[in-house]
Amino acid sequence: MKKSVRKAVIAGNWKMNKTPSETTALINEMKPLVADADCDVVLCVPYIDIPAAVEAAKGSNIKIGAENIHFKASGAYTGEISADMLKEAGVEYVVVGHSERRTYFGETDQTVNLRTLAAVNAGFTAIVCVGETLEQRELGYTETLLKYQTKMALTNVKPEQLKNVIIAYEPVWAIGTGVTATAEQADEGNGYVRAAIAEAYGADAAEAVTVQYGGSMNAKNADELLEKVNVDGGLIGGASLKAEDFSIIVKAASK
Ligand code: 13P
C-alpha cells in the first residue's frame, strides 16, 4: 500500500450468501470490530440484503455496495437493477465484472465497460474486477490480459471520473480455492493494472488509483499481501462472511 497517495479500501463481496436477517446480525457483529479502521470499509451484498445492510450500517464507518448494476436506466430487463434503484436504496459502491459473472452469466468486456460507465455516471464508486485464468497465466498472457481487461473496462471513463474507480485484481485460479497468489504475484498483477491505467491516463492518474487484490485473502495472509506497494486493499469473499476474520483484514490495512 502507498497510503501517502492512495486510499486503502477493504471491501467484502458476500456473493450469494446471507439473508436480510442474517445481514443485520453480521453487520451488527462487525461494527464494533472495524470502528477504528484507518481505511475505507465496504460490504457489497446481494440486492435483497441492501435495505437491511444500509439500516444496520447507519452511523458506522461501514459503507454498502451492490454486486452488480445494469447499464440501462430502466425498461424491459427482467431481473436487472438500475442505478436509480441502487441510489435510492443508499448504495455507494458497485462491484462490476466479477469473474463469476463473466464465467456464469455471459458478462463480456463490453458489458463490463457499460456497467462501469453506468456506475460512475451515477456517482457510485465502481469496483471493477479483472483477472486471468490459470490457463492464461500458464500461457504467459497475464500481463496482456490484465492490461486489456483494464483498458476495456475503462473505455470512455473520463479522467475526472477515475477517482470513482477501484480496480480489483482477482486471479480466477485464486478465487474461492484457498490458493492465494503469492504477495509477489499480487503485487505484479496489480502493477500491470496500474501500468495499463498509466498508458491510458498518464502516470499521475495511475498512482492515485486504488488497486485491490482479491482471491482467498484471509486473516492469515492479509498482512503480507497488503505490505506490497501496489496492493491498496482487498476484495474479500469467504473471509468477509466472518466478522472476526474480516476485522483482522481491516486492521491489517489500517497499519
Ligand atoms: P474468496 O475470498 O472467497 O476467494 O473470493 C474472492 C472474490 O471473488 C472476491 O470478489
Image: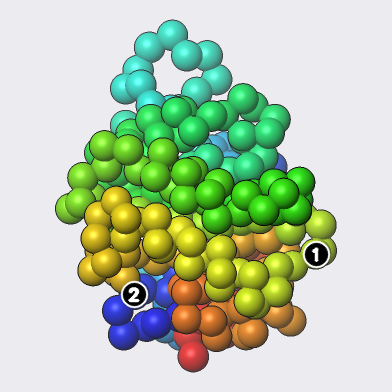
* Pointer 2 residue Cβ closer than 8 Å to ligand 1: no
Numbered label tally? 2
x%, y% of residue 107?
56, 29
Q: Nearer the viewer, residue 171 or 48?
A: 171
Question: Which quadrant of the rendered structure holds the N terminus?
Answer: bottom left
Q: Which residue is mark 2?
A: 6
**Three-letter amino acid code of the residue under disc 2:** Arg
Upstream in the sequence, badge 2 or badge 1? 2
211 versus 182 height, above or below: above
The quarter of the displayed image where residue 206 is located: bottom left
Any mark on residue 179, and which?
1
Amino acid under disc 1: Val
The residue under the point 47% across, 74% down is: 230
Q: Is residue 48 left or right of residue 176?
A: left
Q: Residue furthest right?
A: 178
Figure check: 65 above or below 234: above
Alpha carbons under labels 2 and 1: distance apart = 27 Å
| One can see residue 141 in this view | yes
Determine which of the numbered discs, if any, sits on residue 255 in the image. none
- Residue drawn at 38 percent across, 30 percent down: 114
Q: Is mark 1 within 8 Å of ligand 1?
A: no
Given residues 80 and 158, the one toward you in this image is 158
Give x and y (percent) for residue 73: 32, 22
What SS does tag 1 mark? Answer: loop
User: In terms of secondary structure, where does tag 2 sit?
Assistant: loop
Of all residues, the one furthest to the front in this rendering is 140
Reply above or below: 233 against 170: below
The residue at the point 35 percent across, 43 percent down is 154
Label 1, residues with CA under 10 Å away: few <14, some 14-19, many ≥20: few
